[in-house]
């Protein structure tokens, strides 16, 4: 600033010279005082010496200008980031980068927390929470401070300006430097005189603008201080309240997105299981949707590979079973264990290069002990070669049988080509019966001399077993292989591929692992040793004894060296089953996720969301207040009392009753519609498709397991049909399907019981009012009959009307009995569980009353016989629900597994089923006596499944009410705490504005 003034002064030397000349040329007068001279000089120079106008400008506060400022801020932050990377950022730019870092860091934290959540809504709420926090930080000073301050004081203390270097700042941010020179008066909001008027500054005050600036500075400091004091309370409270409100908006959106995603997954699996996705598309579906990587080994395959060629123990078998049946219960793991044992088979004689050396040493010791001279003729090396040849011959013999059984016998036969079938059968028989005695599997030739032992043995086995001579078929190793090659090269190639693979496996296991020879293949070892001994030993009694000792040594060795070994075939079988189970689990995971989202009562599922909506509707229609919630949440009995009181009130008025059950019914119907309606373009009910896919996946896997001889696992998965009933029992498949039905039936049972409770309360209230009118002194029977639409008989008017009232409302003609029915019926519908039905509601000694109770509650009739139609009052409820409850497109709502069905019809079926089932089970008392049967019901005494009865009874409405009240109160308690805190903070903050900027009397207008 000093330099600017000097430059200014230097540029005006002429003016200053003239001024000095004028002063020197004045006539001599009495000298003025020093102070007077100085004041005169200051007044003159004030007109000449002043700072340059600021090059910055105030930022316009308007919505129109907001996009422009946003773009400008974005460009500035981008430049700041670039300058920061180059190490050229200034303090202001670093401050901007700090704000950017806060946002990026917040997004990063929200992203990490999102990965810890399991549902779409909770994932999204992590970002909503962070966004709400940032918004609250911005919104609080704007709403609670800036706007009130502007309205009360006439200026925006948070006004922003851009300086000559392009930096955006707040005018009132630094009380030591506030660029009031930018208030040039171009707009009212930037005119200090106008602001002074709003602040109440004297208009005739000398230096009025300076006083205005000081008031603005003071108010800005006070507001900034208040911002710092209140932000710590207001920001988190606003964030919590914003998240709570946002959740209400997000829930239906997230539900719709999740439902569509689940439906797509179910559709994809259904198409895959039905074969509508095949070839390359199927492979892509398996990889992308099911997450199956065909090139990745399953855990079971890894274990099999590590155990192959080794002697197993029970721990190894348990490990295999656990991985094969991973995720299943103990029954499935036991089944897997049994199947693995069956596939591995009995203990087999096991051998390898080391064991052949040990056996050769034992055998040579026997020869040496019997005839030392013979021992020099038959060396230990020769014995080892004989044992090795016999061992490999036994292994090759196993291999050939395996090819016959597991390759050739599995080739589909062609009914129209008997010649082909006969040839395949002949080749298979030749494989199974081929004698490999006399073949040398260890010979060295110039071509194999450079090979390793493993490579040479594999080569020799391969060259022997796949030998085919089409010009001279008699030289075929396996007879008729030349004919098979000429007939079908594909089959020949398949057989060769198997032979080559197993030849390499035999060589590898002989030198580096363990071969399972088996009892029926030990003869090749015995034969090789016998041929060696007989070819060199003289025919003497001594040789005969040695030969006997050799056989005994071999037998003992075979018995002592037995174990469980995973052969190549067993390994292929187990890994094949593992791949099948891997695919099953991948498909089942998709279906289980669909089942969970559709029917389980967990966070963000359709059932949970709908249950909350039905609860909200019930409480709204009953007029439950905050006071009611507080009382009901503390005690079940108090909650039940409030529930009964509110229910009586709502059900006593026809209009409020109609509104109650219609709104409840509509909310209840939405659950089935959401669960069952396919995505756009679909037609099949989603729940039926889900159940069908569960069935197909289990059955497909069961057949594959059966093909791998995992019969016990197959039974556990899909079960065999029960011989007596033809019903599949005790299977995982049925448990999964039953879970679907049980959950849906349980929710339906709870919903229908709630509607039935409303129906009974309404019907009971109507009956009580009608009886009260009938019993009143001076009752007008004609008027009552007219309202009921009946004609009075010649006499016994009261008895006649009493009977008609009982029929209309499904009660007993005996008013005292009806009174008891109403009392017990309300209690039963509100609170009873399954065990109360078994105990006959405490009426075991009064079967006639129990019959009437059951009829009146579940099968109210308009006639003396229970099956002669429904009472008029009950039928009216059915009609209200059938006509008032519609799906989103106005049609009859869908019912899962039942097609389109009105809610009234569903309630009717529920009540009918309850009467048939519940009144049936209570007729049976197993206490050493014949079942106690209630006469006259016309219902067969047949018990249903316990789970079906439980689902039918559903959740007691009293518990429904209490649990909901408790949950609502606990949730609302925090919101009711936060809202007053925020309101009080807001009011206090706004009120403080009236205390800010108090003026001294000398400047106050």
Image: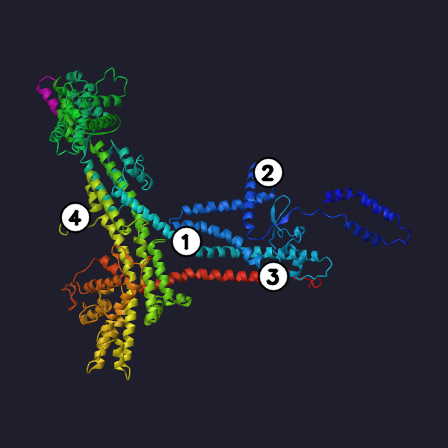
Image spot of residue 288 (x, y percent)? 33, 40
| Magenta span contains residue 925 | no
Label at residue 152? 3
Q: Is residue 926 visible?
A: yes
* Location of residue 961 with respect to 326 vertically, above or below: below
* Snapshot quadrant of residue 822: bottom left
The mark nearer the N terminus, 2 or 3, is 2
Provide the secondary structure element on which disc 1 rests.
helix
Residue at mark 4 to residue at mark 2: CA–CA distance: 81 Å
Camera-nearest label, 4 or 3? 3
Marks 4 and 2 close (CB-CB < 8 Å): no
Q: How crowded is the residue under tag 4: few (<14 C-alpha within 10 Å), some, or many (20+)?
A: few
Q: Which residue is mark 4?
A: 721
Q: Which residue is mark 1?
A: 250
Residue situated in front as seen by the camera: 213 or 113: 213
Q: In the image, which residues are magenta?
A: 537-548
Q: Is residue 861 left or right of residue 259?
A: left
Residue situated in front as seen by the camera: 770 or 719: 770
Provide the secondary structure element on which disc 2 rests.
loop
The mark nearer the N terminus, 2 or 1, is 2
Image spot of residue 695 (x, y percent)? 23, 47
Q: How crowded is the residue under tag 1: few (<14 C-alpha within 10 Å), some, or many (20+)?
A: some
Residue at mark 1 to residue at mark 4: CA–CA distance: 47 Å
Quadrant (top left/top right/bottom left/bottom right) for the C terminus: bottom right
Q: Is residue 100 left or right of residue 393?
A: right
Quadrant (top left/top right/bottom left/bottom right) for the N terminus: top right
Q: Which residue is mark 2?
A: 88
């Amino acid at each position: 600033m000093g330099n600017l003034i000097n430059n200014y002064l230097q540029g005006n030397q002429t003016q200053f010279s003239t001024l000095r000349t004028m002063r020197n040329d004045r006539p001599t007068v009495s000298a003025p005082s020093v102070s007077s001279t100085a004041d005169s000089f200051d007044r003159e120079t004030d007109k000449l010496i002043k700072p340059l106008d600021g090059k910055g400008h105030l930022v316009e506060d308007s919505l129109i200008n907001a996009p422009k400022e946003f773009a400008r801020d974005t460009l500035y932050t981008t430049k700041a980031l670039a300058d920061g990377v180059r190490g050229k950022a200034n303090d202001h730019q670093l401050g901007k980068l700090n704000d950017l870092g806060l946002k990026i860091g917040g997004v990063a934290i929200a992203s990490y927390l999102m990965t810890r959540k399991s549902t779409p809504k909770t994932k999204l709420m992590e970002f909503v929470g962070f966004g709400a926090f940032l918004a609250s930080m911005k919104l609080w000073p704007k709403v609670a401070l800036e706007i009130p301050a502007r309205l009360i004081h006439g200026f925006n203390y948070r006004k922003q300006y851009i300086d000559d270097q392009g930096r955006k700042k707040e005018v009132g941010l630094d009380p030591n430097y506030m660029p009031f020179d930018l208030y040039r008066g171009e707009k009212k909001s930037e005119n200090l005189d106008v602001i002074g008027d709003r602040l109440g500054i004297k208009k005739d005050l000398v230096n009025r603008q300076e006083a205005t600036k000081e008031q603005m500075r003071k108010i800005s400091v006070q507001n900034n201080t208040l911002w710092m004091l209140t932000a710590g309370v207001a920001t988190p409270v606003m964030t919590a309240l914003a998240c709570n409100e946002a959740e209400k908006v997000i829930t239906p959106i997230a539900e719709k997105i999740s439902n569509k995603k689940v439906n797509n997954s179910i559709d994809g699996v259904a198409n895959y299981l039905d074969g509508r996705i095949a070839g390359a598309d199927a492979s892509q579906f398996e990889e992308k949707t099911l997450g199956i990587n065909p090139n990745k080994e399953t855990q079971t395959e890894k274990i099999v590979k590590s155990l192959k060629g080794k002697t197993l123990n029970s721990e190894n078998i348990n490990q295999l079973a656990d991985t094969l049946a991973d995720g299943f219960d103990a029954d499935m793991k036991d089944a897997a264990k049994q199947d693995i044992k069956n596939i591995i088979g009995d203990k087999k004689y096991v051998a390898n290069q080391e064991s052949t050396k040990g056996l050769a040493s034992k055998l040579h010791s026997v020869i040496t002990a019997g005839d030392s001279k013979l021992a020099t003729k038959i060396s230990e090396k020769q014995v080892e070669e004989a044992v090795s040849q016999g061992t490999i011959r036994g292994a090759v013999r196993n291999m050939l049988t395996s090819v016959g059984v597991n390759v050739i016998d599995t080739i589909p036969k062609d009914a129209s080509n008997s010649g082909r079938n006969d040839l395949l059968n002949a080749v298979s028989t030749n494989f199974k019966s081929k004698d490999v005695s006399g073949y040398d599997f260890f010979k060295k030739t110039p071509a194999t001399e450079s090979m390793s032992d493993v490579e040479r043995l594999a080569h020799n086995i391969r060259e022997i077993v796949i030998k085919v001579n089409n010009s001279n078929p008699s030289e075929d190793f396996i007879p008729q292989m030349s004919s098979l090659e000429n007939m079908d090269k594909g089959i020949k190639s398949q057989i060769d591929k198997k032979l080559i693979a197993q030849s390499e496996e035999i060589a590898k296991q002989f030198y580096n692992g363990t071969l399972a020879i088996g009892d029926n293949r030990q003869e090749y070892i015995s034969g090789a040793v016998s041929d060696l001994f007989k070819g060199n030993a003289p025919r003497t009694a001594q040789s005969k004894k040695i030969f006997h000792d050799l056989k005994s040594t071999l037998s003992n060795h075979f018995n002592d060296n037995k174990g469980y070994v995973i052969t190549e075939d067993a390994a292929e079988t187990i890994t094949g089953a593992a791949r099948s189970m891997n695919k099953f689990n991948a498909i089942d995971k998709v279906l289980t996720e669909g089942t969970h989202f559709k029917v389980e009562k967990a966070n963000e599922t359709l059932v949970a969301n709908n249950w909350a909506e039905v609860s909200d509707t019930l409480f709204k229609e009953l007029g439950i207040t905050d006071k009611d919630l507080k009382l009901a949440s503390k005690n079940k009995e108090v909650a039940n009392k409030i529930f009964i009181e509110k229910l009586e009130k709502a059900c006593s008025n026809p209009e409020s009753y109609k509104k109650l059950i219609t709104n409840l019914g509509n909310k209840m119907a939405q659950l089935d519609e959401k669960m069952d309606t396919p995505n756009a373009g679909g037609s099949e009910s989603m729940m039926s498709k889900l159940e069908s896919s569960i069935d197909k996946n289990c059955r497909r896997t069961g057949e594959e397991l059966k093909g791998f001889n995992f019969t016990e696992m197959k039974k556990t998965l899909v079960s065999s049909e029960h011989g007596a009933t033809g019903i599949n029992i005790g299977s995982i498949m049925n448990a999964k399907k039953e879970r679907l039905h049980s959950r849906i039936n349980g929710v339906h049972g709870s919903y229908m019981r709630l509607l039935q409770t409303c129906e009974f309360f309404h019907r009971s209230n109507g009956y009580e009012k009608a009886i009260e009118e009938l019993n009143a002194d001076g009752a007008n029977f004609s008027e009552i009959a007219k309202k009921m639409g009946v004609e009075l008989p010649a006499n016994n008017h009261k008895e006649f009307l009493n009977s008609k009232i009982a029929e209309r409302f499904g009660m007993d003609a005996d008013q005292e009995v009806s009174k008891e029915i109403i009392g017990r019926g309300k209690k039963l519908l509100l609170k009873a569980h399954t065990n109360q039905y078994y105990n006959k509601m405490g009426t075991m000694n009064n079967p006639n009353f129990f019959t009437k109770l059951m009829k009146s509650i579940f099968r109210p009739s308009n006639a003396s016989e229970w099956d002669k139609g429904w009472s008029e009052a009950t039928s009216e409820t059915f009609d209200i629900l059938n006509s008032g409850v519609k799906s989103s497109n106005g049609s009859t709502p869908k019912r899962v597994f039942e097609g389109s069905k009105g809610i009234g019809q569903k309630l009717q079926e529920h009540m009918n089923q309850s009467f048939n089932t519940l009144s049936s089970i209570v007729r049976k008392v197993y206490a050493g006596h014949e079942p106690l049967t209630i006469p006259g019901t016309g219902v067969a005494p047949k018990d249903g499944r316990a789970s079906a009865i439980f689902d039918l009874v559903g959740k007691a409405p009293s518990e429904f009410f209490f649990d909901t009240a408790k949950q609502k109160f606990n949730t609302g308690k925090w919101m009711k705490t936060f809202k007053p805190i925020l309101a009080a903070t807001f009011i206090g903050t706004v009120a403080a504005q009236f205390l800010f900027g108090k003026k001294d009397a000398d400047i106050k207008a």
